Amino acid sequence: MKVLIVGSGGREHAIAASVAKSSKVDEIYCAPGNAGIGMIAQCVPIGAMEFDKIVAFAKEKEIDLTIVGMDDPLVGGLVDELEAAGLRVFGPRKNAAILEGSKAFSKDLMKKYNIPTASYENFDNAKDAEAYLEKAKFPIVLKADGLALGKGVLICKDLEEAKEGVKSIMLDKKFGSAGNQMVIEEFMTGREVSVLSFVDGKTIKTMTSAQDHKRAMDGDQGLNTGGMGTFSPSPFYTEEVDEFCKKYIYQPTVDAMAAEGREFKGIIFFGLMLTEAGPKVLEYNARFGDPEAQVVLPRMKNDIVEVAEACIDGKLDEIDLQFEDNAAVCVVLASEGYPVNYEKGYAIHGLEAFEGKEDYYCFHAGTKKTEEGIVTNGGRVLGITAKGRNLKEARANAYEAADWVTFENKYMRSDIGKAIEEV
């Protein structure tokens, strides 16, 4: 069969690598893809938001399955467009992708269906938000309602900082139209855990747990990013936590969406906070996390195409989802200055070191193929993933592999997974 993947990051490279392992697949295309994806798939110069071109291409090439990796096209309704053209596609429709597309919607959904989350209020004008903050308890969290590349969340330690945050989100429009509406919620403390899941509208099957490092610098300092590295599994995600989440969070979320007439088929990413009062939902995403996919998918034993088709056909209950009994760590190699200002176009050396090496992966994020070779083309350049018998071994392997690759302005955190390798 022929598979088309929509997107251009490390997540899409991890998806493509999983798809390439499927015995069902003969040809893989990616729109627009990147230099790494181009090694295992045919990249086509179509942007992820060029819906008409994607639909036309899928029809022309008689694509059997399209996998939409990115949030923007999902929230924008690409799945609906492909389905309307009679094509099979893995991902939620527009009315279900709102679970990620609007934080106000997801918070209201959790309140209505008693799904554990932080207390909050929604605001659509700055004056009301500021008035609410006058009586609020600090620290407090401000969230732009819409999509903001994982960066539309501000943690404010006092009233002055919070008022500046309201100004930047709602008045200065730092995150564009994502800030037309805003959520203000209580600041929760505890361990963060990410759990990805496959959903077919009624059945949910969770994948192995993971944890992301969002801050740009060591010790969780610096600005929020799209993710500087991940590890899987999380030692804090115990059987007890899993049982609680299955009963009070996972299945209730799927049932709530169905009850609202928004049947969800695809991936639900649960961002969880393990608080003293029990697990609570920090956020939902409607697709694989990036870089979480880069540590979760290499550990999955199942054929990803088989699982995706079971979700589309409402037969996920027939799938026995299995993961390897090991660990994986991903270290992101970024361009110095990310996530604010950084330069592109530097030659990348050492990529050939990964050829033929089992349990080592080099997922491309911001790369481009040129006549001179592969060059940097973004803030996050590569995701270096390695497996090991445990987190300590996986971490050592990942950092060893991170040294195989060089490029000018290369930057990475040195503490991905460090705090938990002894747990």
Image: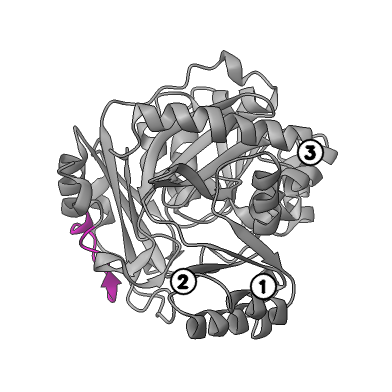
Q: Main secondary structure of the magenta part?
A: loop
Verify whether residue 46 appears in magenta.
no
Q: Earlier in the sequence, mark 2 or mark 1?
A: 2
Q: Classify 10 Å Cα crowding around label 2: few (below 14), some (14-19), many (20 and above).
A: some
- Where residue 339 sits in the image (x, y, percent)? 43, 74
- Say left or right for 72 vs 352: right
- Residue linked to disc 1: 179
> Quick one: 418 or 252, which is closer to the camera?
252
Report the residue at 49% width, 56% height from top. Answer: 9
- Where residue 298 sits in the image (x, y, percent)? 37, 36
Of tags 2 and 3, the one toward the viewer is 2
Report the residue at 59% width, 16% height from top. Answer: 317
Verify whether residue 407 appears in magenta.
yes
Residue type highlighted by circle 1 = Gly
- Residue linked to disc 3: 260
Residue type highlighted by circle 3 = Glu
- Say left or right for 178 vs 400: right
Rendering quarter of residue 366: bottom left
Q: Which residues are the magenta region?
A: 402-415
> Quick one: 384 or 194, which is closer to the camera?
194
- Residue linked to disc 2: 138
Marks 2 and 3, how far apart in space?
34 Å
